[in-house]
Image (cartoon, rainbow, N blue to C red):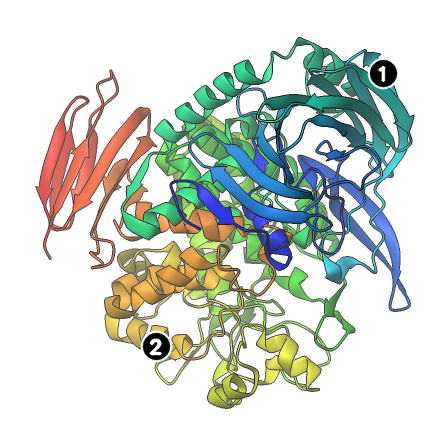
Amino acid sequence: MTGPGWEYEGYVPADERLRESLCTLGNGYFATRGALPECAADEVHYPGTYVAGCYNRLTSEVAGRRVENEDMVNVPNWLPLRYRLPGGAWLTPDTASVLGHRQVLHLTSGLLERRTRYDLGGGREVTVRQQRLVHMGDPHLAALRTEFTARGFSGPLEVEAALDGGVTNAGVPRYRDLDGRHLTHVHTGTAAPDTVWLRCRTRTSDIRIGMAARLTADAPLTVHHELPRAVQRSTLDLVAGRTATVDKTVALHTSRDPAISDPLYAAVDRVGRAPGFDELLESHLTAWDQLWRRADLDVAGEAGRILRLHLFHVLQTLSPHTADLDVGVPARGLHGEAYRGHVFWDELFVLPYLNLHFPEVSRALLRYRHRRLEQACTAAREAGRKGAMYPWQSGSDGREETQQLHLNPRSGRWLPDHSRLQHHVGSAIAYNVWQYCEASGDTEFLHTKGAEMLLHIARFWADSAVYDESLGRHRIKGVVGPDEYHEAYPDARRPGLDDNAYTNVTAAWVLARTLELLRTLPEPRRRELVERGGLDGGELELWEDVSRTLHVPFHDDVISQFEGYGDLTELDWEGYRARYGDIRRLDRILEAEGDSVNRYQASKQADVLMLGYLFSPAELQSLFHRLGYRLDEETWRRTVDHYLRRTSHGSTLSGLVHGWVLARARRAEAWKYCQEALQGDIADVQGGTTGEGIHLGAMAGTLDLVQRGLTGLETRDGALWLDPVPLPELSSYGFALRYQGHWGVRLRLQRERLEIAVPSSDASPIDVRLPGRTVTLRPGETGQLSLPD
């Protein structure tokens, strides 16, 4: 990979799935994997197009049980365009002789370009150059330009373009025992001499999908309807040395779209009004220019290049178009079918970045959670709890979508999945509400929808806490922490762990913040909330008590991941590394050996250390003080060291969190983990997972590492707080952000100097607080601040 874009030279079948994910194009409404248009889905290629929020639920027979799963649907494939000499085989890199192949993802323009030279024998060659876009200005349009250039011959070339409704969800080998046939009632037709259409619907969610394609070529077109495909054909007369062009323009709508009467009519109408490729490209470039200005990030070297790729994929999944949709943060983007397109806690790593660039998108993603608050309250009630119990995996309507069984590819066994006990997702939602409102100044959201979510999440935690007379403290039992390896105590009959430190500390934070909010709300609004929620003084007293008495276990002068963690067996880390090499998925290795990771002091990813990711050192010390514990620097340093030695990093989020924490706790080792976070997807460090979809939380998290982690940037108490930590490997960088009505506040850090430029406007001055001093900058002013080494 070289050059200004993201570039791949040569055709390597084994790398194709990875390239398809990393060359996905999208616009926040839909995205299409970077598959070659002439190749159908097989073991090498997997074309896939996904519409944000388009889910369908199917039931499958697995391991003797009926299992229900909801998936983000692979909608009809708009890409197909293949070509051949008359009477010959269709040309693909797998079946024909390839003289050269190059694929470039142009990040600045959101354009995917490929160039392939085929050897046709007898000194004849044809070069195929394609440019593809998924329009960032009009979220319902995509276009593909294909240019054919003959060398050493002149003659006919047959071209066939199609819309294919015969697709299934089959992109993840682990899921192939599950039913993936989500589309039904496929119909095709002709709208105009150059335009065909396809319509279908999802089998149970009954989402109607309409797609229309216009083909433009310098030759007559014929149309053939071969269900489930609408096919357009043309025969080009190639002349040696001259280029013949075919343009395919596509429109996509679903019945979830606002302001339409029928998705098929809308698609046909839109594609009929769409301009030609050159004009579409021009407006697409303008839209991308505007996005890059708002999300400007200036980091030198290879790290900067990777960060730009990460930013590109975040913007393609969650663009300003997302602000109009009812969708959450899909953990694997719109780039593949891993995790079935579900929404986990990854917004915890995504929203802090978006808050300071695209707050309207953050607000929409939080509204997704608010719309599902009633479902979360129902889930809590069914579990015998008050308040809101948000699901670990969410999809269309907010019910728990976590699978009951998961497959261990090493052993081939289907095993019970207890990850639905990760109730800390509720704290992540509350944290995101608070962070969004602090960064944006959106008091209207905080006082209305935000307050409602905080109240019900706080109520859930207070009701989940049980008082232990012997400890004189409250405890939260039967949960799973972020680590995910540990789902139960060794040989226990029931799943769940007691007093997960991360869960308890964040629950205490939620309770404290909610009480603070209730105290500061305008009295009429507070009264409304209290009346509607049936709150009384006794319940609020309980919240106050629980927020100060939740139990945090310790062992050997370090914070225990959960009660009893210190009693677990130490793992022979070196032995397992010597035997297996890559032990990131230690849980699968041990299960295949007939053992269980529940027996060992071993973590998949950061758990206790997540506290150092969410909270600044001062805030974390304050939280522990409120709980009646002393957390000094030495105790935290010992805790960091303890878990650093016992973590296998089986998640792309793990390197990110460790890099963030070590930047303050042990600077010399931080860059190693920052590098792992940067390389996570491009090097596919998890071994084949990126081909199933990018890791959106890790990508956004690396951006936030530069934006907040290394700068110590916090938005609280109406001010910008900064406490930079210089890393030798990343000592000079700059970015722009949007803060409480100020568009384009520019920060640049260089060695021991910080520059902040506030653009001219009629907004209020910004208070900037650094250790030991406060600076006030008015619109139009630039501050030059010296920093201690």
Q: Which mark is residue 477?
A: none
The residue nearer to you, when weighing 289 against 512, is 289
Question: Going 42% across and 50% down the picture, which residue do you hit?
Answer: 701
Number of residues whose C-alpha sits closer than 10 Å to that of mark 1, classed few (under 14), some (14–19) or many (20 or more): some
- Nearer the camera: disc 1 or disc 2: 1
Residue type pointed to by label 1: Thr
Return the mark for residue 190: 1
Between the residue at mark 1 and the residue at mark 2, the CA separation in whole angstroms equals 66 Å
Question: Which residue is painted at 11% across and 50% down in the image?
Answer: 752
Q: Residue at x 57, y 83 (%)?
A: 580
Amino acid identity at mark 2: Asp
- Apparent side of residue 113 relative to residue 181 in the rendered image (left or right): left
Q: Which mark is residue 641?
A: 2
Instruction: First in sequence, mark 1 or 2: give its number.
Output: 1
User: What x and y, as percent, mark residue 522?
Assistant: 41, 29
The answer to whether residue 447 of the structure is visible from this angle is: no
Q: Residue at x 69, y 37 (%)?
A: 37
For label 2, the SS is: helix
Apparent side of residue 752 relative to residue 248 in the rendered image (left or right): left
Q: Quadrant of the C terminus?
A: bottom left
Q: Is residue 96 above or below residue 476?
A: above
Residue 367, image quadrant: top right
As rendered, which of 707 and 524 lies closer to the eye? 707
Q: Is residue 609 left or right of residue 208?
A: left
Q: Secondary structure at mark 1?
A: strand
Question: Do residues under tags 1 and 2 come within 8 Å of each other at their CB atoms?
Answer: no
Measured as percent of width and height from the top left, residue 101 is found at 56, 45
